[in-house]
Amino acid sequence: MPPLESAGDPWLGGEDWTCQPLLQAGMSVVFVIGVAFTLIWVTTWVRFYTGLERLRKAGCSCISDMRRRESGKAQQPASKGDLPRVSVLLPVKGVHARSHHNWRHQMESTHGGEVEFIFCIESQDDPAYQAVKKFREERDADARRRGQGAIKIVVAGLSFHSSQKIHNLLEGVKHVSGRSDYVLFLDDDAEMRPAIMRDLIFHLEDDPSVLVATGYPHEYIAPSTPHVSFAGFMLLGYRKLAYLNISLLHPPALWGGCLMLRRSELMDPRIGILEAWRDRGYSDDMIVGGRVHRSRRRMCHPATCVLVSEVDPAYSFGRHLNYLARQMFVLDTYSDATVRAQNY
């Protein structure tokens, strides 16, 4: 009987390609990465599910109220003047279809205390300038909404020493009231809820080691959306990576679209956030994150602080490439060795 190899069967003769060491090593790496991502996403889901379930059972919409009820402390009704004062800075550029909706939602989603809203705009030629002026006039004319917060408009001018967004924020900080306890940096393209501002304040008051409280974005496809481009799905996939941070109460990174700090610490030159922004700063959140690590403090992300926004049906592949290019460029910008080590 001839040996099997001479029988002319190609499956029995020759070396199996799946036995290649390089291929096996690559498949092992892919498997380990897949398992790691799965575990992190499961951890994220468990954290949010348990947190929201506790809120549901307690009959609360925010973590601060839930903690008081669980500790047996009845929530005492506080007057508006007794609650912390907050200054909200909104860097605005251009106007989109949901701008007025988001601004209205943000002004109505406060913690119940005194709040001022500072719109930071590059120039009066920006369409956002006239849109914000009209929005302020409409609110001043509406007697039901006059007490929801004062609106200031700051025209920052062109920037020559930092990114335009940071320049706008720096000019806005100059107009923050000296009576404010907290400063919230908030993008104008995300919807707020009252629980978000309350829980940001609660975690800053509850834990002195926390320097910055942050939220995270979550894009979704609205049921009324007729179609979404392939680039829109690419954006959703990219955003999934951000969920690796959401799984932790004290994440290693933060999102510049929702940052709250104590006003005294924002102005503190020993921490140096504003100084680093002025010194040719490009990425506002990357610099703030570096200062948190440098000062050996912590960031905090409450489970309720997720800001949702609809995916733009017209989101194009060119816009997505531009977004990715800016994200990659940010990684090569740093204000000191701490941020450089963090990026790389």
Image (cartoon, grey):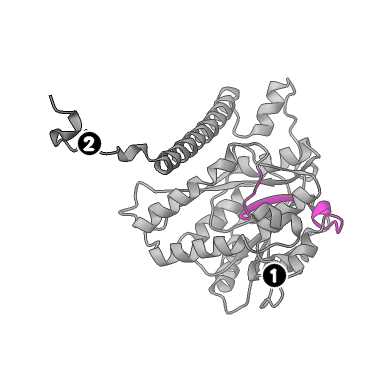
- Give x and y (percent) for residue 343: 65, 55
Q: Which of 93 and 145 is in front in this view?
A: 93
Figure check: 53 above or below 244: above
Q: Which of 161 and 25 is in front in this view?
A: 25
Figure check: 27 above or below 321: above
Under tag 1, what secondary structure?
Answer: helix
Q: What residue type is labelled 1?
A: His
Q: What stretch is highlighted in magenta?
A: 252-271
Figure check: 114 above or below 35: below
Residue at position x 80%, y 42% in the image: 82
Under tag 2, what secondary structure?
Answer: loop
Residue at position x 72%, y 70% in the image: 280
- Give x and y (percent) for residue 90: 64, 61
Q: Mark 1 points at which residue?
A: 167
The reply to whether residue 309 is visible in this rendering is no
Quarter location, residue 316? bottom left
Residue at position x 48%, y 66% in the image: 322
Is 259 a magenta residue? Answer: yes
| 182 horizontally vs 214: left or right | right
The reply to whether residue 129 is visible in this rendering is yes
